[in-house]
Amino acid sequence: HSLRSQPFARNSSFNASSQLGGTEADAKGHRRAAVPAEPGWNPGPSSGTMWLAGATLMVSLIVAATGLVEPGLRCPQPALPAGTILRPPGTNVTLPCLEGEQENSTIVYWKLNGQNISSLCGRLVVERSHLVLPSVHYNDSGLYSCHANGHIIRSVHLLVEEPPEVPDFTCFRRSFTKDILCEWKPSRRLSSRSKAKLFVGKGLMGRNHTEHQCRYYSKSQKFSCRITMTHQDEDISIRVAMCVANSAGTATSDQKYYRTSNLVKPDPPENVMVTPVEMAPRKLLVTWRYPSSWGSKIYRLRFQLRYRADISRTYSEVELPLEMTSHLITDALQSLPHRVQVRAHEEFDYGTWSEWSRESTGVPWTEPPEPETTASNFPEFPPDHNFVTPDASTIPEFPTGQENQNVEVVVRVALHTFLIPIATVVLVLALVVWILVRFREKWQAASSGGVKTKIALSYSLTPVASGPPLSSSPLLSPPASPFSESSADSPRILENSPYDVSNADYFLLPR
C-alpha cells in the first residue's frame, strides 16, 4: 500500500508547497508542506502519517472498485473427461468408426447410451461407417458406440455445451431476521452440468471472502444462493460476486457492494380479500395480513394499496398509515368488478418495496332484485276467506324477514285478481236492477192513465158448407129481442146502449 500511496502523497505535498511557499522532507523521504510554525501548534512527524493513511484508504477504495484487491477470486473450469468431444449447439457433428478397407466391407451399427440408433429419432444418419448428427442440441449429449459383429469397435462421448453468459444477479432479504438470497435467471438455456457459486466478503474491504454454492431450480429456471447472516450482520457492508462454470467455459460477474440493511425486501401481503359493504353501493372493504416470511414482531411494515375498475386501465394508489391492514374504498363504481393489490415496505424505509400481491376482485353491494311472482307461488286460501277485511285469527303465519316481504307481494296480487270479477258482477246486477225499476215506473204510469190493452183475437178457419149462395140470404137479419131464445148465442146488448150490435162484423174489424 505504501508504494501505491507514494505518488498520491507527492502530489499532495506539491500542491501544499505551491500554496504555502516551501517543502521539507520527512524521515522516509516523503515530501510534505513546510507550514510556518504557529503558537501552540507543532506539526511533528504525526501529520505525515495521517496523510499516508488517507492516501492508502483512497487508493484501496479505487482498487477495490476495479476488483483488483482479491486476485484469488477465480472461477475454475471443470476438466473434460478423456475421449470427450465438445461441440456447441447448432453445429454438425460426424463420428467416425472404421477406416480404410474395413469401412466398405464391414456392416456396423451405432448405439447411444446402450440403445440402437434406429430405435431413436430418425434425424441421425449413418453414412457407411460414420454417424452424422446435423444441428446438435443439448439432448444429443451422451456415449456413442460403434458395433460390428457383436463387438464394440469405437466409443466416444459427445458433450453439447456452450460457455455460460456473465451472470447479472440481485440480492435481497425478506426481513432483518432472514438470510440474504442472491438470485440469477439466465437469459438462455443452460445445461444441467452448469454450476454457480457466490463469493462473499464482509466489511468495507471485503476481505476473507467465503464461497457459497448456488442451487438451480428447474421450475423457475434460476439459480439461488444463500448468505447466512447473524444478528451482528444486521447493518454491515458486503461485497458479492457470482461465478458460473461448465465444461465449455466460465463467466464471473462484476463485484457488487451492498449494505445489508438496504437489502430488505418483504414478500407481498397475504390473504388479500375484497368484500362489499352492505347498503353502500360505492364502497369496498379490503383486508390483508402480514407476509408469513416476515417473522418478526419487533420490525413493522407499512403498506400501499392500488385498485381499479375492470373498465379502467389506470390504478388509484393509496398510502396507508403504519401497521394498518385494512382499507375502505369509498369511490368504487357501482355494480362493476374492481381489482385490488397491496404491497409492503419496512417502516423506516430500509430496503425496497415488495412485489404487488396477486389481484383480488370484488364487486360493490347491489340491491337484490325483487323475486318474480308466478301462479305456482300463490298460497292456497279457503273458499270462504275474506280478502278485504281478513280476520286476524284466519291469517296464516309466514316467516319473518325477506320471505315475509315476498308473501305480502303475493297476497296483494291475489286480491287484485279476485276483486276484478267480483266488481264486474256487482256492476251487472246494479244495471239490471236499474232497468227493472225504470220499466216498472213506466208501467204504473200507463195503467193509471186508462190505457187499454190490446187483446189479440185468434180466429180459426172452417170449411164453408155447401148451401145456397150468399146472394140469396139477406145481409142483415131482422132485429130480435135480446131476451128471445132464438138469440141466445148472440151478444146481449142492454137497452139504451149506444152500440148497434146488429152487425157482428163490427167486433171483428180492428179499430
Image (tube, grey):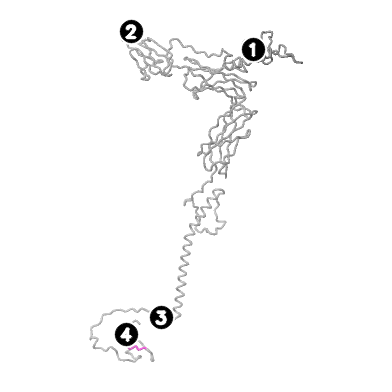
In the rendered view, tell whether residue 397 sits above or below residue 107: below
> Dot 4, how many residues are within 10 Å of its Cα: few (below 14), some (14-19), or many (20+)?
few
In the rendered view, would you say 265 is above or below 330? Answer: above
Instruction: Name the residue tied to disc 3.
Output: 452
Camera-side residue of 149 and 204:
204
For badge 4, the amino acid type reads Asp
The CA distance from mark 1 to mark 3 is 162 Å
Q: Secondary structure at mark 3?
A: loop
Query: From which residue to which does the magenta span run?
Result: 499-503
Q: Earlier in the sequence, mark 3 or mark 2?
A: 2
- Give how far apart the Cα atoms at labels 3 and 2 are: 156 Å
- The majority secondary structure of the magenta stretch comes to loop
Sequence-earlier tag: 3 or 4: 3
Residue corresponding to mark 1: 10
The amino acid marked with disc number 1 is Arg
Dot 2 or dot 4, earlier in sequence: 2
Do labels 2 and 4 touch, CB within 8 Å? no
Secondary structure found at label 2? loop
Which residue reaches farthest front? Answer: 21
Q: How many marks?
A: 4
Q: Residue at x 34, y 8 (%)?
A: 99
Q: Is residue 340 magenta?
A: no
Q: Residue 455: x and y, percent? A: 37, 79
Percent of width and height locating residue 373: 48, 51
